[in-house]
Image: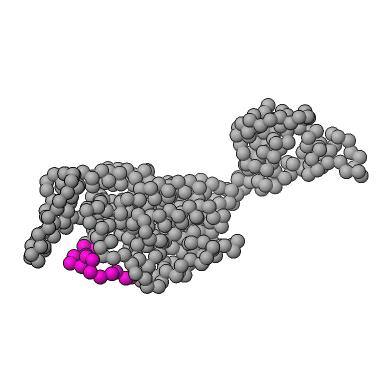
Amino acid sequence: MTEPPDNTRTSAGPSLAQIAGRVLNRPLLLHPDKADLILHVLQGRIGIEPLQTVTPETNRFVGTYRRDNGSIGSMRVENGVAILPIVGSLVNRGAWIGASSGLVSYEGIAAQLREAEADLDVRAILMDIDSPGGEATGMFATAKLVSAVNKTKPVVAFVNDVAASAAYGIASAASEIIVSPTSMVGSIGVVLTHLDRSGELEDRGVKPTLIHAGAHKVDGHPFGPLSDAVRADLQAEVMKIYHQFVGLVAEGRAGRISPDAIRATEARTYLGADAISQGLADRMASLEEVIGALSQPPSGASPQRKGGAMTKTPQSEAPSSDVSAISPADLRAAVDVARTEAHAAGVSAGKAEATARIKSILTAPETDGREAQALVLALETEMTAADAAKVLAASPKANMSASIADRAAQETELGAETPADHRNRSERSAAGWAKAITQANARFS
């Protein structure tokens, strides 16, 4: 792979006409302040001058593009944590993460999520979000992908410092939303803007005529006010997307905020602690603290999933509703105790489960006549006994019939007889099984 592109250079961004095409007469999941700024820039300047911006690459001092195996990735990784920056206005297509256009595409986010999921050097994914939102198209699919990847590797959203509207929709699908005291989250709503430019054109002596086929072909044109019928159609479209947005957030934040509570926010935004109290965020922390917590390997425990805390508290302690009440020293001590207990329990349980699984595969009725394949499935894969039985049942039997012990004795790695070895067949079989069990235990230690 080549080195990631230099994202600090100035390059031509999208024209104002292209921006206008993306924001006018289209439902947007965008913070109203950002919408107002865009309209102010567009007013009277559409199609006149190009827009050039320089967007510094986010997190340039954290992590590296180079992986432990020497390859180059498209995002930085710090101690096994992939840092996925979502900085800028969101569009469905046409811009890569960190591009100098100042836009972030859902396509780019999805590509990096899939890359991080497949990267063996990555154990967790941190979405570093600073975005006012953007296009509705593409956001729902991206949020669904976040939820799907989260089932494989923990995906955490860190709001640094705005996650509004579509950006919050993506964050809501993560296992946890972490904020700073000044982080702004929310704006769960939809906005569609129509510009009536008829007065401006009249002052300039311009009178457009629209010739069209199809009664609704020119609905929402900018050369006059909206009719009541067109306004009603557009409002219905906005409400449909709004209901989908509420459902998406409610699903991602299940158990922390209800659909009714989401609607009751009326698309407000909330800062820091207020966002946590509303159920829109989970806790406060710094970027360094989040990366440090995610960097810890899951010592025998399953990766964090949606709805749980990132660290495990001792069973004798009830989780505190006020995270800020836990001192850093107490938190570290609780994590150390939990990690030690989880590791011991995981090793013991892993050995017991491995032994039972191997025995189940090798003694299954489907193993008869397929002993060699059963050994491979039992010792060289992590396939369950039920799945192994299905594979064996669909496989042809060997031409010669032999017992499992006999076939084990014939394999050199299981202690086959050498010219200097005069042990009888039963001794060789016992040695072979002892070695197989030792290998299996070593894999699960």
Q: Is residue 395 above or below residue 267?
A: above
Going by the image, does 362 lie left or right of 325? right
Return the x and y of residue 47 as percentages of the image width and height.
23, 66
**Residue at (78% x, 35% y) in the render:** 407
Return the x and y of residue 384 as percentages of the image width and height.
61, 36
Return the x and y of residue 18 as percentages of the image width and height.
28, 61
**Residue at (30% x, 51% y) in the render:** 136
* Residue 8 on the magenta segment: no
**Residue at (68% x, 26% y) in the render:** 365
Going by the image, does 241 lie left or right of 110? left
Return the x and y of residue 135 as percentages of the image width and height.
30, 54
Going by the image, does 364 lie left or right of 107? right
Nearer the observer, 155 or 210: 210
**Residue at (30% x, 46% y) in the render:** 245
Numbered range of the magenta stretch: 37-53
Which quadrant, please, contains the N terminus? bottom right
Residue 218 seen in the current view: yes
Going by the image, does 212 lie left or right of 171? left
